[in-house]
Amino acid sequence: MIKINLFMNLDSYMLPCINKKYLGIECPGCGIQRAVSLLLEGDFIAAFHMYPAIYTILILLGFVGINLFISIKNSLKIKIFLLYLNAAIIFISYIIKMTHIIH
């Protein structure tokens, strides 16, 4: 099976994490660029393992984008729920990541 990688040079355009560069520890956003790259390559499971909040962020962005053109009942409550959900996933996954690094 031949895999055509349309995004093979995408990794060379990624921004470095300033927090990791100067402090030596990852920030809560570390991995999101690589997760997007993995999504574009079609590796959905690896994208989730790289950054667990990637799918809920995409859902939030999609909802906000749709809500720009279509009025949705209780859209503010839905957006707030999705924001809190994303924050919780990012926070919990960061704590798990940091405890694995410490131990």
Image (cartoon, rainbow, N blue to C red):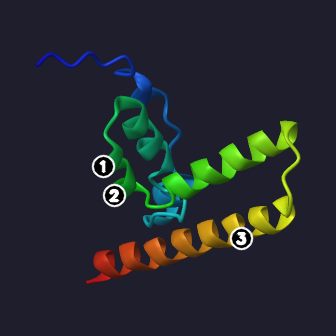
Is the Cβ of the residue at disc 1 closer than 8 Å to that at disc 2?
yes
> In this picture, is 81 found above or below 64?
below
Q: Quadrant of the N terminus?
A: top left
> In this picture, is 56 found above or below 13?
below
Mark 2: which amino acid?
His
Mark 3: which amino acid?
Phe
**Residue, disc 1:** 46
Q: Who's the residue at 76% across and 40% down the image? A: 65
> In this picture, is 65 found above or below 85?
above
Element at label 3: helix
Q: Who's the residue at 47% across and 72% down the image? A: 94
Indicate which label's residue lies in the foreground, 2 or 3.
3
Question: Percent x, y for residue 71?
Answer: 88, 47
Q: Nearer the viewer, residue 100 or 37?
A: 37
**Residue, disc 3:** 81
**Residue, disc 2:** 49
Give the CA distance from mark 3 to mark 1. 26 Å
Left or right, residue 54 beside residue 64: left
Q: Who's the residue at 59% across and 48% down the image? A: 58
Of the residues under marks 3 and 1, which one precedes in the sequence? 1
Give the CA distance from mark 2 to mark 3. 23 Å
Give the CA distance from mark 1 to mark 2. 5 Å
Element at label 1: helix
Left or right, residue 60 beside residue 11: right
User: Residue 80: which quarter of the image?
Assistant: bottom right
Mark 1 crowdedness (10 Å alpha carbons): few <14, some 14-19, many ≥20: some
Q: Quadrant of the C terminus?
A: bottom left
Q: Going by the picture, which residue comes out furthest to the left?
A: 1
Is the Cβ of the residue at disc 2 closer than 8 Å to that at disc 3?
no
Question: Percent x, y for residue 18?
Answer: 55, 53
